[in-house]
Amino acid sequence: MFDWGEDFQQLLHDGIRGFAEASWGFIQDAFAASNLDDHWWASVVGGDIETVVNGEVVSTISHPGMLNVVVVALIPLLIIFVVLQVIMSMIRGSVAGLMRAMAMAVFALPATYIVTGLIWLIITGLDDVSLWILQTGTENGSDEAMAGLLALFGMTWDATTQEVLLDENYMQWQWAVQDGEVGRSLVSFVLGLIIWLACLLLILMMVFRLIAILILTVFMPAAMFAVSFEGSKAIFSRWTGVMLGLALAKPMAAVVIKLGLVLSSLGGNWIESAIGIVIIVVAAAMPLVLAPLFAAVTGGGSTSVDQAGAGMGRSGGGRLERGAGRTSRSVSHSAKRLVTRR
């Protein structure tokens, strides 16, 4: 017969353990599983994608690489930008503008693939830096660092039994095992749920960072081609800022987590749990914070369209004014000659 008191408390206790194990899995994979590798990169530059089931390759697909597809699709955009730059430069009499148009017409495609290679080197390098930051001061690698973060919540990773243990010396987990204290067990259950949600947010944001980097790389030709036209060069500046912010988000998140391990000595049971939750949420927010920040810093050329238009207006107006002046002087001179003859 179902005992609402005892059985429900056991249900809550099992749920707490489930949240703890899932939280450990999320924390452990947030930095390792979201690293850029050949499988992720194949979707950008192309390659053979294998489907593995039970250790066996069941299918192999040759992917052309979405970057190559987008480059071909945006070649008309490059031509439009180059033509606009040539026309504007001829109107303004700008040799530098003509040189810009010719240079981008020749080097835009090679530069696109060179920048793509640099993105691969930078992102993989920063992923390694993130793991190094987490491993600093530990002997068993990043798992020990992640276990230290887990300790903020009063949990312990037992590498021998491969289980997450709840430290009953922490009041929140002591309540979970007290017989007849269903209400207190419910508080522990809610805390476990909050910790699980925070850890879920961390891994989701790290995966979001990786996918956003891949998408920005695929559409990078549009930003690169925009450099051809002086009025649209701010697009590349914005793209660079967002990419830089996303690239640095992971190392910054690792720094925040290591900082949280130091701050854990500042409080007791509940304070440590609060610090752990805040640290994970702040680390998860790094992609959303840094990407707009760097985009704003590097987007100083956002008014280049207006500046270019104003330059064209001033140049054209000046020429019209000079032309009108010459016409006026010519008419006046002709009138004077006519009066003199009479």
Image (cartoon, rainbow, N blue to C red):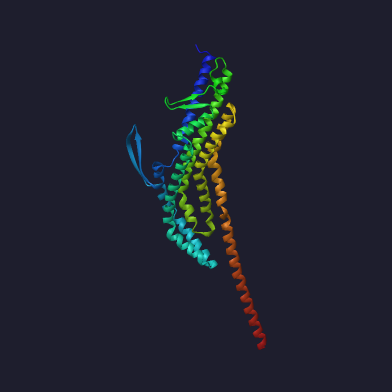
Which percent across, then down, holds residue 170? 55, 23
Taking the view exactly as shown, the residue that stands out farthest to the top is 1
Q: Is residue 234 visible?
A: yes
Quadrant in the picture for residue 5? top right
Looking at the image, which is closer to me, 162 or 262?
262
Which percent across, then down, holds residue 116? 43, 50
Quadrant in the picture for residue 281? top right
Left or right: 96 as drawn, with respect to 160 = right
Q: How many marks?
A: 0
* Whether residue 332 is situated above or below residue 207 in the rendered picture: below
Taking the view exactly as shown, the residue that stands out farthest to the bottom is 341
* Whether residue 64 is situated above or below residue 167 in the rendered picture: below
* Whether residue 101 is situated above or below residue 211 in the rendered picture: below
Left or right: 81 as drawn, with respect to 50 = right
Looking at the image, which is closer to me, 96 or 75?
96
Q: Quadrant of the C terminus?
A: bottom right
The structure residue drawn at horizontal position 44% and vertical position 45%, both measured from the top left corner, is: 125
Which percent across, then down, holds residue 70? 43, 50
Quadrant in the picture for residue 34? top left
Q: Is residue 27 visible?
A: no
The structure residue drawn at horizontal position 51% and vertical position 30%, both measured from the top left corner, is: 150
